[in-house]
């Protein structure tokens, strides 16, 4: 297995709130905001949802640095629960004026393919627009689920930039743009 992999990072945006049908699911679900969550719970979500896709940007942060980010009043962490268990996470960073960034979004591996991605993302988009930004952005890369980019585009995001990067696949995961 290689120590690193080249990725294509795609940056997407919405400049107006899209009309989205109300999502439905037959599963027992709840979406709850985790206000000032314990760092260990955030790391659990981040590693569970992002591990298969080599999410790296938060792994090496100290607990104190991470706590400052996730406890900021303009950082919104939402947890999708399915049948009472955490099934996904979404983090919206609204610290920049007129901008909401869906910083992290995804499902735990056990819930991928169960029809919850569109359901949760539709709610995440609505939650981002409820913050009244002028623009909502997100990014994805070729290590994310293959359905991620098409789903983002189906729900109204358009590509505004692409860049190449390298993700380290070692225990000290890190990502750098090239």
Image: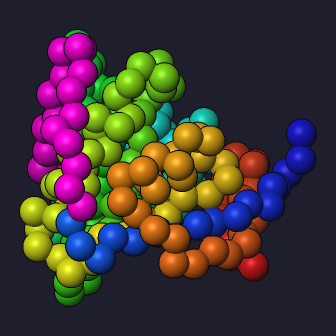
Residue 55 versus residue 134: which sits nearer the camera?
Answer: 134
Residue 134 image offset from top left, x and y in percent: 21, 81
Q: Is residue 106 visible?
A: yes
Image-quadrant location for residue 64: bottom left
Which residue shows up at 81% across the image and 55% down it?
A: 5
Q: Would residue 92 appear left or right of 32 to someone viewing this image? A: right
The quadrant of the picture occupied by the N terminus is top right
Q: Would residue 54 appear left or right of 95 to someone viewing this image? A: right
Image height check: is 98 above or below 101?
A: below
Residue 51 image offset from top left, x and y in percent: 56, 39
Q: Would residue 10 appear left or right of 170 to someone viewing this image? A: left
Q: Which region shows up in magenta?
A: 18-41
Q: Is residue 70 visible?
A: no
Residue 134 versus residue 86: which sits nearer the camera?
Answer: 134
Residue 63 image offset from top left, x and y in percent: 37, 56
Q: Is residue 132 magenta?
A: no
Residue 80 image offset from top left, x and y in percent: 25, 33
Which residue shows up at 54% across the image and 52% down it?
A: 149
Predominant SS along the magenta part:
loop
In the orientation shown, which residue stands out farthest toward the right?
1
Which residue shows up at 24% across the image and 73% down it?
A: 16
The quadrant of the picture occupied by the C terminus is bottom right
Which residue shows up at 38% across the image and 35% down it?
A: 117
Image-quadrant location for residue 100: bottom left
């Amino acid at each position: 297995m290689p120590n690193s992999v080249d990725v294509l990072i795609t940056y997407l945006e919405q400049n107006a709130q899209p009309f989205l049908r109300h999502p439905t699911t037959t599963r027992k679900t709840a979406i709850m905001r985790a206000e000032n969550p314990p760092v260990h719970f955030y790391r659990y979500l981040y590693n569970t949802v992002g591990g298969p896709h080599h999410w790296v940007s938060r792994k090496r942060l100290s607990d104190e640095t991470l706590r400052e980010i996730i406890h900021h009043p303009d950082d919104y962490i939402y947890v999708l629960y399915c049948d009472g268990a955490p099934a996904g996470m979404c983090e919206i960073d609204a610290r920049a004026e007129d901008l909401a960034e869906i910083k992290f979004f995804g499902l735990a591996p056990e819930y991928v393919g169960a029809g919850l991605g569109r359901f949760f993302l539709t709610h995440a988009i609505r939650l981002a627009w409820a913050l009244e930004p002028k623009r909502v952005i997100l990014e994805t890369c070729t290590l994310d689920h293959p359905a991620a980019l098409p789903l983002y585009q189906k729900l109204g995001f358009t590509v505004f930039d692409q860049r190449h990067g390298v993700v380290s696949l070692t225990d000290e995961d890190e990502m750098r743009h090239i």
